[in-house]
Image (tube, rainbow, N blue to C red):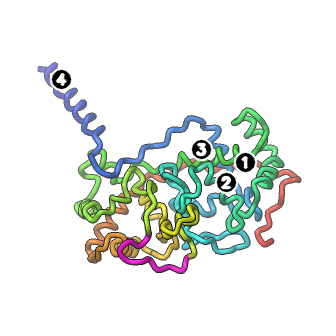
Amino acid sequence: MKLKAIAIASALVLTGTAWAATVRDEPIQPIEPAKITNPGMVELGKKLFFDPRLSRSGFISCNSCHNLSMGGSDNLKTSIGDKWQQGPINSPTVLNSSLAVAQFWDGRAADLKEQAGGPIANPGEMAFTHDLAVDTLRSIPGYVAEFKSVFGSAAIDINKITKAIASFEETLVTPNSPFDAWLKGDEKALTDRELAGYGLFKESGCVACHNGPALGGTSFQKMGLFEPYKTNNPAEGRAAVTGKDEDRMNFKVPTLRNVELTYPYFHDGEAATLEQAVDVMGRLQLGRKYSEQEISDIVAFLKTLTGDQPTFVMPLLPASSNDTPKPNPWQ
């Protein structure tokens, strides 16, 4: 009798394990935790991500526009750049960005490594040059020692800088959202209202673009299929890269992971709330006018996509030397 009880208990455990390991067959897949294979590289990249000395003013860091305390964005319509100038486009979240087919709204960078070098040399953002950024890091003894430890050589160049930053950014994934729990079989993870919102999200056709683990980031789509999108923002979308007029207003589909944290929405930041964003997307992209209840249900679903935010010890940046350029945000 005792052996039979043990056998039944073992069977239940095995069944439960198999059930928990089964992922629902949906157009969206769970986010998996990051696997860190080179912690030294990641730690160096974290320091560089937070270091404002990579900017001309000594005041702007990667985290300025991709604030990890604010969903990996800055919650502004467009970011603040060098000399307090207004940036040309809404800052996309850095969270889960490693899952995207390309970087930037127009996809001009193939990967995170290439993207990391862009803002440093952009006159409207960090407004430095790659050479000056390298010279600045070479003037900091702590960085020289850390680059030698990570790369096996004290030589510092932009390739190593961007590789380290990208390695850190690749760890910025957000698993374990309520929706992920539901995908993995937890029937109690979502409420009836949230499930209704997801059902409407699928039935409406939102998943045609917002699919995969990141619910987006894997394609470029025209903004304004059923109605033209009216904006004063000068961004041309994919056309700025390809030079083709048919790519005008084609933007990379943004991820919907953690979307409740990354307001305002769209490339121009003109949708202040999720409700506004859902209404506009329904009309312009799907040719559908959602009711207030439908919008409320979809928003309830979207809020289940907030996962575990990156947690880590804030980096202690190495001290400047007498030769390191001094910060001057008012120049």
**Residue 95 at x, y = what percent?**
51, 54
Q: Which residue is mark 1?
A: 158
Circles 2 and 1 in contact, beta carbons < 8 Å? yes
Residue shown at the point (42%, 77%) measured from the top left: 228
Residue in the image at 13% along x and 22% along y:
4
Q: Position of residue 211 (x, y in %)?
A: 36, 55
Q: Name which of mark 2 and mark 1 comes first in the sequence.
A: 2
Instruction: Tell me the CA gap for discs 2 and 1.
Output: 8 Å
Sequence-first disc among 3 and 4 = 4
Badge 3 or badge 1: first in the primary sequence:
1
Give the camera-side residue of 317 and 77: 77
Q: Determine the main secondary structure of the stretch shown in magenta.
A: loop
Q: Amino acid at mark 4?
A: Ala
Name the residue carrying label 2: 117
Q: Earlier in the sequence, mark 4 or mark 2?
A: 4
Q: Which residue is mark 3?
A: 167
Is 242 placed left or right of 276 in the picture?
A: right
Q: Residue furthest left?
A: 1
For label 2, the crowd category at 10 Å Cα-Cα, with few meaning under 14, some 14 to 19 and many 20 or more, is: many
Nearer the observer: mark 4 or 2; the answer is: 2
- Horizontal and vertical percent for residue 122? 69, 63
Q: Please rate how many residues cluster around mark 4, counting C-alpha atoms within 10 Å: few if below 14, some from 14 to 19, many from 20.
A: few
**Quadrant in which the N terminus appears:** top left
